[in-house]
Image: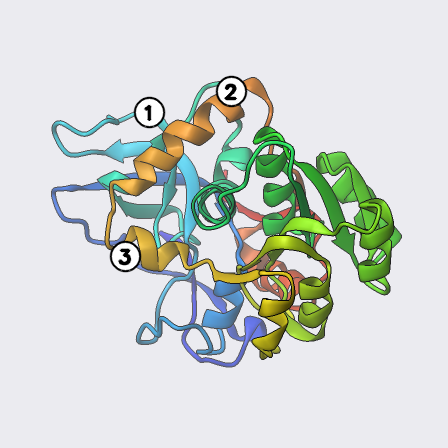
Amino acid sequence: MRAVRVARLEGPDSVEVVDIAEPANRPDQVVIETHASGVTFPDVLLTRGEYQLKPETPFVPGSEVAGVVRRAPEGSAVKAGDRVAAFTGFGGFAETAVAESYAVFPLPESVSFEAGAALPMNYFTVDFALRRRGALRSGETVLVHGAAGGVGTAAIQVAKAMGAKVIAVTSTKDKAAVALDAGADEAVLVDGFKDATRTLTAGEGVDVVVDPVGGDRFTDSLRSLAPEGRLLVVGFTGRDIPLVKVNRLLLNNVSVVGVGWGAFWTRNPAYLQEQWAFLLPLLESGRIDPPIGSRYPLTAAAEALKELDERRASGKVLVQLK
């Protein structure tokens, strides 16, 4: 089969498309013919050896796929021929992928393979962030950083589905338009977002901040919180990991909350199916609909990774195989 392989930890330009043997699978795993793969920021970090998981080279990146089941264990919720989305962890940038049964999700006919490939990492992460870690309540206001990207657009849609008002923060007006199209109520530019947020909330601040970016905006995010607000730390696409002066947490009884979706579900794999049970009705009703930004063939996977690495992405970036 054809696959994207990381043989040298030198960044996106070092990945290569090769012919390799199909992955071996245990009898209790699901084998999937890949139609589309989602591209995530951890994939970028993996190409440099900067992610917390450090597989031995060579390896095939790609943590989320959508496609058709080729083989499934007896008693599984899916069978050969079923359309599915899946969280693979690794190996998704390939014509054939393998996933654990608990990380495979039946995909309705009304949902495209492209949308399916955009779900497992981003939507499951923000569902965990908003529902479990952030305890978001209907009527609250959520500020979303990086709001035009895959995580950002997912956060907008899940927050709106939960009854929240959403303020999107983006770096350009074009990206603001993407965030508004995804469902945000308001959009502000990152320069001066704190003051703009205070104006939009009549000086009260927001109840929840979703931050997949980090960096130097972190302090102003804390200052943007209403009393008892929660700042959800999702990631650091801005590369700089901020430090917290904890005295700031006392001023308005605010919280900084870590969002480690992978660390949580690996201790409780059944949680993934619980999340799917929550997300599926929203998907079927159209309340969540992953905005697709760029599509690349497998041979251009390096360009897909570079789009995320250079923070040019608007919407979800995909590698298409079918």
Q: Which residue is pictured at 77% across the width and 43% down the height?
A: 178
Q: Which residue is pictured at 55% across the width and 36% down the height?
A: 137
The answer to whether mark 1 and mark 2 are in CB contact below 8 A is no
Residue 6 at what x, y percent from top left?
Answer: 43, 71
Work out whether mark 1 precedes mark 2 in sequence or the reverse, and give the earlier one: 1
Question: Which element is circle 3 on?
Answer: loop
Horizontal side of residue 167 vs 162, given as left or right = right
Residue 307 at what x, y percent from top left?
Answer: 67, 61
Look at label 2 and name its amino acid: Glu
Residue 84 visible in the picture: no
Question: Which element is circle 2 on?
Answer: helix
Look at discs 3 and 2 and give the one toward the viewer: 2
How far apart are labels 1 and 2 at the CA level? 17 Å
Q: Pick whichever, 124 or 191, lies toward us.
A: 191
Q: Quadrant of residue 165?
A: top right
Look at label 1 and name its amino acid: Asp
Would you name the residue on which mark 2 appears? 284
Q: Pick whichever, 23 or 78, lies toward us.
A: 78
Look at discs 1 and 2 and give the one toward the viewer: 2
Label 3: how many Cα within 10 Å (few below 14, some 14–19, many 20+)? few
Q: Pick whichever, 111 or 261, lies toward us.
A: 261
Q: Which residue is pictured at 44% across the width and 80% down the height?
A: 8
Work out whether mark 3 precedes mark 1 in sequence or the reverse, and give the earlier one: 3
Question: Which element is circle 1 on?
Answer: loop
Look at label 3 and name its amino acid: Ala
- Which mark, residue 82? 1
Would you name the residue on which mark 3 appears? 21
